[in-house]
Image (tube, grey):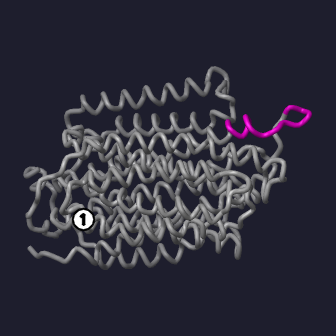
Amino acid sequence: MTTRNPWPALWAIVIGFFMILVDTTIVSVANPAIKAALDPESNNLDNVVWVTSAYLLAYAAPLLITGRLGDRFGPKRIYLLGLIVFTLGSLGSGMSGSLDVLIVTRAVQGVGAALMTPQTMAIITRTFPPKIRGAAMGLWGSTAGVALLVGPLLGGLLVDGFGWQWVFFINLPVGVVAFVLAAILVPKLDTHPHRFDIGGVLLSAAGIFLLAFGLQQAAHYDWGVIWGPVSIWSMIGTGIALLVIFVWWQSRTKNEPLVPLELFRDRNFSLANVGIFAGGFAITALMLPYMFYLQLARGLTPTQSALVMVPLAVISAVLSPYAGRLLDRVDPRLIIVPATLTIGAGLVYYILLMTPDSNVLWYLVPSVMMGFGNAGMWGPLAATATRNLAPRMAGAGSGVYNTTRTIGSVLGSAGIAALMQARLEANLPRNAAGETPGIGGGQLPAELVGPFSTAMAESLILPTVVIVLGGLALLFLQRPPRHDAPAVPVRKVQSGVEDHARG
């Protein structure tokens, strides 16, 4: 039995995790160009928003079971499989010739991301001792900050220089490097035999899909009938009902539920899930209307739009490791609550500035605010959620946590798409036929800039409310007890029976 330095493995998996996060931010910048190329005639934004939502839906739906797959077959093996799927999905996305094909290949990317993400947190939880886990999660969280910097900037440069396809092709060399490093540096960890709750998988996946799809298509169908007896409200209601049944199913499953409800006996785990749902919702919901506003209303190029986000990304990347180290010493509320509310204040500032003639340089101020908020939210929330998890629950806990984050992003994308379209229809003038004018590609005509800016600003009220409510809930976090336990030894278990007996 040997003990290994866990830091090289962390650096290896951070590359793949970084690629997943970059793929979200890089596509946000490319969305206007994708719409101009593949959906120029439509006056709806919800079609192109599906490029993001399909990825997030396919990401969210399997997360609960992919965490368990890591426990059962080893997080390294599942992580590497996810890298392969994600990289192939990136290749298909770059080669897409229609919006429908792009949406499908983005869903393939989402499945790969779902296989990878829970393994990153599980590896950290199982290889770092609690007393330094905050620092490790700080590095994990700073990856989001770097992605927020690299994603928009790289996306802008690639779209302006080579075309939108290259925001996907760039993943190919990164995926190869990430695979090689992870294969060499990530250790093989203990495995735990699991039964897979197929009923829970079907209920959760169907519920999430129906809820998100209904919200996303609400404006397109004017909150009415989709087909025959199927309406938007019936779809949303069915989705909510299935998720309620899913929770009941988990409470009744005796063998091994998909979501062990015992995880939520830990107040910090429960509240951290509330906080990360709000964070995922708010950040995703910000990027979509903001990038459309900057490029269509203000005429900025993708690269110029990305430059406005630089303070957010740099501050988040630089300060996240320090926030993680500080978390090991202080009450988590002193870091997480102010950070979350700072994000809310930044969103309010964005709303006030999104007018036809505001000085673009002022957008650096809320970007700075968002940078401080992100630094104190992502890593510290993850560390607080997983700090007290037993090793045998690491995969399940990280799966639940990442599912919550991604569901927040899914509903943020769907909700903001519905609200953006609704506000556009309310604000844009109608032609003689009673239709709103097209908003295909390029800067809008002068007469549409004002109402379009108003519509995008009004849509940001939704994520502002969500993140503020999440921050208030985090006031009830508890400071976890101090831990001085040694690092978890890393070894391969030939049979999982002995571990299961101990668990």
Name the secondary structure under disc 1: helix
- Drawn side of residue 108 relative to residue 443, left or right: left
Q: Nearer the viewer, residue 454 or 81?
A: 454
Horizontal and vertical percent position of residue 288: 60, 52
Of the 4 image quadrants, the one containing the N terminus is bottom left
Horizontal and vertical percent position of residue 388: 17, 52
Q: Is residue 324 magenta?
A: no
Horizontal and vertical percent position of residue 445: 84, 53
- Drawn side of residue 329 relative to residue 70, left or right: left
| Residue sitting at the far right | 432
Residues packed near mark 1 inside 10 Å, few (<14), some (14 to 19) or many (20 plus) = some
Please say whether residue 392 is visible from this viewpoint: yes
Please say whether residue 58 is visible from this viewpoint: no
Task: Write the start and end of the magenta stretch as one range.
Answer: 422-434
Q: Residue at x 29, y 78 (%)?
A: 185
Q: Residue at x 39, y 57 (%)?
A: 115
Q: Residue at x 35, y 35 (%)?
A: 199
Horizontal and vertical percent position of residue 61: 44, 45
- Drawn side of residue 185 relative to residue 363, left or right: left
- Drawn side of residue 320 relative to residue 344, left or right: left
Residue 77 lies in quadrant: bottom left
Q: Is residue 425 magenta?
A: yes
Q: Nearer the viewer, residue 485 or 193?
A: 485
Tally of marks: 1
Q: Amino acid at mark 1?
A: Leu
The residue that disc 1 covers is 326
Residue 265 lies in quadrant: top left
Residue 395, compared with residue 204, is above or below; it is below
Q: Nearer the viewer, residue 371 or 74?
A: 371
